[in-house]
Image (cartoon, grey):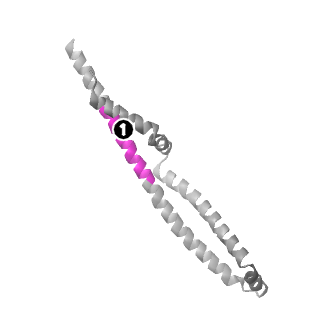
Amino acid sequence: MINKDRVRTMTRLAIYEEGQGIADDKMNGYFKNDYIVGHMVGSFVSGTIACLLVVFVYCCYHYDTLLIQVFENQVGGLIETALTIYAAFMVFFLAVSFFVYRWRFNATRGRLDRYRRRLEHLKESYEKEDKHADNRF
């Protein structure tokens, strides 16, 4: 006889394994701090590249003003302002990255725990059936 609860559990497990389970399995190989720090390094690199692109566009747009400031030796204040803005942006960007990747890791851990509980439930269901079948003979 078909056990509807077992079929439902196996269906949920299969859907998870074919969908979100693939990405969660990749993340499962990391410790929490390793996962977060690794992605923050990537965020630092991408944030720095974004800032460099913004500086390039700014320099292209204000080329004539920048040349005047270079010839009059007034670049020090501009560089100081640019570095301050870069530092503030990176602190904000890395803080947001930290919270996003921590949330993703915790969400994945929750899904994996739910997956393991369903596997245990399925295992217990089979063990009950085996015990019941052994008692009949």
State whether residue 9 is above or below residue 43: above
For residue 19, side relative to residue 54 (left or right):
left
Q: Position of residue 66 (x, y in %)?
A: 73, 81
Residue at the (36%, 33%) spot, across then down: 11
- Does the magenta-highlighted stretch encompass residue 109? yes
Q: In terms of secondary structure, what is the magenta stretch mainly?
A: helix
66 left or right of 116 in image: right
Residue 61 place in picture, x, y as percent: 71, 76
Q: Amino acid at mark 1?
A: Arg
Q: Is residue 63 above or below residue 50?
A: below
In the rendered view, does 131 fall on the left or right side of 60?
Answer: left
Which residue position holds label 1? 116
What is the span of residues highlighted in magenta in the rendered image?
104-121
Q: Residue 120 appears at what percent x and percent y? A: 32, 34
> In which quadrant will I find the N terminus?
top left
Q: Residue furthest left?
A: 136
Residue at the image position 41 percent from the left and 34 percent from the top = 14
Specify the quadrant that holds the C terminus. top left
Residue at the image position 68 percent from the left and 75 percent from the top: 58
The residue sitting at 67% across, 79% down in the picture is 79
